[in-house]
Amino acid sequence: MTGAWSKGKYKHYAYYRCETRGCSQKSKSVPKAKLEDGFEEVLKSLQPTKQLVDLAIAMFKDAWNGRLDAAKAERAAWGEKVVVADKSILELVDRLVETQNATVIKAIEAKIEKLEREKIVLSEKAEQPLPSTARFEECMELSMRFLSKPWEIYKNGSYAVRQTVLRLVFSEPLTFTPEGVYGTPKTTLPFKVLGAFSA
């Protein structure tokens, strides 16, 4: 749809016109208020209830805690592998001291070097910081603010914000039927999931 003004007897009126080739409504006008009021209803209908938002937050927290537990377990496993690598290096050093054969010495030194490299990698992994609760709260707050109030963000936002809302809410452009109503909106995954829970 393309916005335009039509001149009346005393003032100008805002309209939208369909410019889609092959459409039965091509070049036909729809009053601005009708189209925009309908869009407002569509966006408001996607706004979940408070209970649904609370449920989504609880599910996200469970998922976050699950990932946190998995990260802790991984760190512990890497720490254990560092201890095993240390033990293996000490055993190889003992063998190195006792060995006189040059070929065996060279093989043991190569294995020690390989274990030292592996130990460095494992130590770095074991020291990686865990996801913080503050980071979760920050992500949650931003995500849920958007998911719970898409219409308010659209209504009060700049042109760039409005375009972002459209991309984040709808997976395909909305259609306006010849009967003067919006077709069933195709939403992005978060709104599909919330809609499924709502149903």
Image: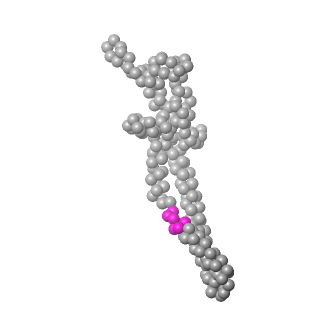
Which percent across, then down, holds residue 16? 44, 22
Q: Is residue 110 left or right of residue 148?
A: right
Residue 126: in magenta span:
yes
Residue 194: in magenta span:
no
The mark total stands at: 0
Q: Nearer the viewer, residue 35 or 123?
A: 123
* Furthest residue in direction top, as rendered: 9
Q: Give the residue at x 66% y 87%.
A: 100
Q: Nearer the viewer, residue 81 or 142?
A: 81
Say if 162 sits above or below 105 in the image.
above
Question: Can residue 118 be spotted in the picture?
Answer: yes
Which percent across, then down, holds residue 10? 31, 14
Say if 137 sits above or below 127 in the image.
above
Q: Give the residue at x 51% y 22%.
A: 20
Q: Is residue 147 left or right of residue 107?
A: left
Question: Can residue 47 be spotted in the picture?
Answer: no
Q: Is residue 114 left or right of residue 143?
A: right
Which percent across, then down, holds residue 66? 58, 58
Which percent across, then down, holds residue 154? 42, 36
* Furthest residue in direction left, as rendered: 10
Q: Give the residue at x 59% y 77%.
A: 86
Q: Nearer the viewer, residue 61 or 178?
A: 178
Quarter holding the C terminus is: top right
Q: Give the residue at x 56% y 30%.
A: 184
- Magenta part of the chain: 124-130
Q: Nearer the viewer, residue 31 or 199?
A: 31
